Image: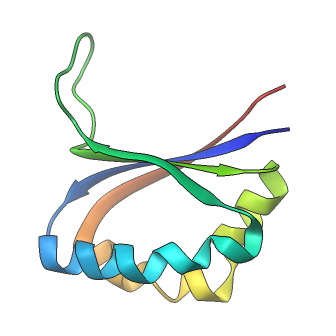
Amino acid sequence: MMTYVIANCNIKDAEKFAEYGALAAPTFAPFGGQLLQKGKLTATLAGPSGAAVTAIFAFDNPEAAMAWYASAAYQALLPLRDAACEMSLSIYSTP
């Protein structure tokens, strides 16, 4: 079951956000995760506007995505992440 982690971010500190991104990137590989897309908000077509930056990551299944999030390597980055941005992370799976 293909699973996607959607990260929506509003950046508070661009320098810390860049550092967080560089440190977070290698934490995906042990769980089979890969970055599919990252982009900045271009326009809002309907509803309230979303985050300034959105990233989409793919995993083979929800268990792998949850294991990545719970991993010691990623959990160690939470203070930096929280200093760098306001982020929501959601998991979506295909049937």
Q: Residue at x 64, y 69 (%)?
A: 69
| Left or right, residue 24 beside residue 13 | right
For this orientation, the residue located farthest to the top is 46
Residue 55, relative to residue 45: is it above or below?
Answer: below
| Left or right, residue 76 beside residue 69 | left
Q: Position of residue 34 (x, y in %)?
A: 60, 58
| Left or right, residue 53 beside residue 71 | left
Q: Picture quarter containing residue 71? A: bottom right
Residue 73, relative to residue 47: is it above or below?
Answer: below
Q: Residue at x 73, y 77 (%)?
A: 30
Q: How many discs mark residues in the rendered view?
A: 0
Q: Residue at x 33, y 73 (%)?
A: 82
Q: Residue at x 26, y 10 (%)?
A: 46
| Left or right, residue 47 beside residue 42 | right
32, 68: nearer the viewer: 32
Q: Position of residue 2 (x, y in %)?
A: 78, 39
Name the quadrant of the C terminus: top right
Q: Picture quarter containing residue 11? A: bottom left
